[in-house]
Amino acid sequence: MSRAKMPPQIFRLVLLTLAIIVSYLIARYLLTPSTFRQYGFYRGDALAELSSRTPVFAGRKSCLECHEEIQTKLFKGEHKTIGCETCHGPSSLHAADPDSEAKKPDKRNTTACIRCHEANPSRPVTQKQINIRNHYTGQKCVECHVPHQPNEVP
Ligand code: HEC
Ligand code: HEC
Ligand code: HEC
Ligand code: HEC
């Protein structure tokens, strides 16, 4: 009895599968960056690239150096847990060069406030919320609220 012969259509499928595997291996060889797996399952160069970026946030401690009175004020009110740069935006350029007009932090009035205070059903009910469409529309929040001490009336 002769050995069972592989039917030709199965043989073609096997060839096709092999061709796919081989082209995948070639592509992987050619496309994998050289430092991949240097430290782990990622590109080793990525570490150096990320650490060479300049940080845009300076952190609250660095603001203290020159704005201590604001920090003291902030700590007395309901915004005590909020970082300066949450409202003022990334300010490391300003902290390094405070005299530059161009690098001054943003005052971000209303946009900063409504990010936390605009009524939203997904927020905890204990969080103080307003509906910007009927909460004194057309006026700036800081006309009636002190951002560094929100429980105070200006
Ligand atoms: C080395 C000192 C220094 C550091 C550090 C510093 N500032 Fe300032 N900042 C100044 C000076 C000087 C002014 C300009 C005088 C003023 O308006 O009070 C100023 C002004 C500002 C203003 C007002 C801008 C405007 O348009 O009037 C904001 C907001 C501000 N700083 C935020 C920050 C934040 C946030 C940080 C921390 C990331 C910070 N500063 C760190 C010195 C500093
Ligand atoms: C809840 C948002 C918020 C936080 C948090 C906040 N600020 Fe402000 N800050 C503002 C707004 C809004 C103004 C503009 C006030 C105005 O135009 O009357 C302002 C104004 C300022 C000014 C200009 C001078 C002044 O007193 O009006 C400085 C300087 C400043 N902030 C620094 C800081 C520093 C430093 C911190 C952190 C200790 C901080 N801010 C935290 C919203 C905030
Ligand atoms: C990062 C989030 C955040 C931002 C941005 C923010 N707030 Fe608040 N705000 C809070 C939290 C947290 C409280 C404390 C009460 C609560 O849980 O709602 C509060 C409380 C308040 C209160 C209530 C004070 C009281 O005693 O009833 C006012 C008014 C207020 N904020 C105004 C503002 C204004 C104006 C701005 C913009 C300059 C602003 N907030 C930006 C988080 C934020
Ligand atoms: C014309 C003055 C005025 C303006 C402008 C104004 N508010 Fe108010 N806000 C008030 C008064 C008065 C209260 C307290 C009574 C009330 O809830 O209406 C209040 C209350 C709040 C509260 C606390 C709500 C609570 O549940 O206790 C938050 C948060 C608040 N305002 C945020 C803002 C923000 C953010 C802006 C800017 C988009 C803003 N306000 C603009 C006058 C003002």
Image: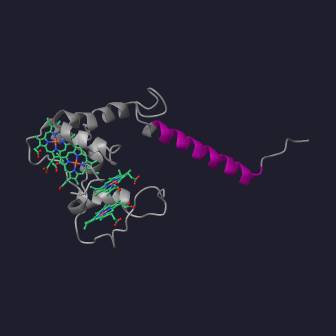
Height in image: 61 above or below 120?
above
Write the start and end of the magenta stretch as one range: 7-29
In the image, taking residue 69 as reference, residue 126 lies left or right, namely right
Nearer to the camera, 81 or 20? 81
Quarter of the figure with the C terminus: bottom left
Q: Where on the image, by quarter, is ligand 4?
A: bottom left
Q: Residue at x 30, y 57 (%)?
A: 113
Q: Residue at x 36, y 31 (%)?
A: 47
x and y, in percent, of residue 110 in the image: 26, 61
| Residue occupying the far right of the picture | 1
Task: Locate residue 74: give its quadrant.
Answer: top left
Quarter of the figure with the N terminus: top right
Is residue 40 visible in the rendered image? The answer is yes
| Residue occupying the far top of the picture | 39
Q: Residue at x 24, y 62 (%)?
A: 144
Nearer to the camera, 126 or 14? 126
Is residue 59 visible in the rendered image? The answer is no
Residue 12 among magenta residues: yes
Nearer to the camera, 61 or 50? 61
x and y, in percent, of residue 143 in the image: 20, 62
